[in-house]
Amino acid sequence: MDTPEHKPKRRKILFILLLILIVGGGGFFYFQYYFVFGDGVKNGQLNNLVYKGYVFKTYEGRLIQVGIRPGITGQGIQSNDFPFSVEDKKLAERLELLSGKDLQLHYKEYRKAIPWRGYSRYIVDSIISVKDPMPYSVNPM
């Protein structure tokens, strides 16, 4: 039977459980979407950078990396590409002017993407270096 002495205990237990649930959920959300899982540098030729999205407009780009890798068995070779997002508008405007150049970009890797940050888990935050692409040489036989 519920006595008046049990109500404060029950409320205290419910409050503690609710607090644990809120703190645990917040920690899980932070770890999944805001914790920087890794950071690094990618080098390659900037293929494109577009501003797109239905609700959240974000800058999305693609870097084509030097080298080739085999595709699915029997289907030839394909290039290595690095899809990324850019949060900073000024950085995106600089990148738009560098399409086709060889770039070295610094990025942060998150565990999961969130719509207002971009479609990719990789967020480019700075340009380390810019070079003109090396011309392809044809080796006469």
Image (cartoon, rainbow, N blue to C red):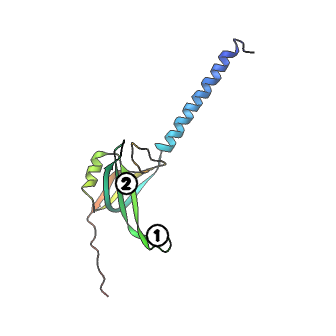
Q: Which residue is mark 1?
A: 71
Q: Quadrant of residue 77?
A: bottom left
CB atoms at circles 2 and 1 under 8 Å apart?
no
Front residue (pair 20, 2): 2
At 41% from the left and 49% from the top, the residue drawn is: 119
Q: Which quadrant, please, contains the C terminus?
A: bottom left
Percent of width and height locating residue 123? 39, 50
> Given the image, on which type of amino acid does mark 2 rest?
His
Q: Is residue 123 above or below residue 138?
A: above
Q: Give whichever of discs 2 and 1 has the lower sequence position.
A: 1
Q: Is residue 100 above or below residue 91?
A: below
At 29% from the left and 85% from the top, the residue drawn is: 140
Percent of width and height locating residue 131? 27, 63
Percent of width and height locating residue 133? 28, 67
Front: mark 2 or 1: 1
Q: What's the CA distance linking mark 2 and mark 1?
A: 27 Å
Percent of width and height locating residue 101? 28, 62
Front residue (pair 72, 109): 72
Q: Is residue 76 above or below residue 21?
A: below
Q: Quadrant of residue 7?
A: top right
Q: Which quadrant, please, contains the N terminus?
A: top right
Give the tally of numbered discs.
2
Front residue (pair 2, 21): 2
At 65% from the left and 16% from the top, the residue drawn is: 8
In the picture, measured across the screen, residue 37 lies left or right of residue 48, that is right
> Given the image, on which type of amino acid does mark 1 rest?
Gly
Disc marking residue 22: none
Secondary structure beneath dot 1 equals loop
Mark 2, other Cα within 10 Å: few <14 / some 14–19 / many ≥20: some
Q: Is residue 131 above or below residue 121?
A: below
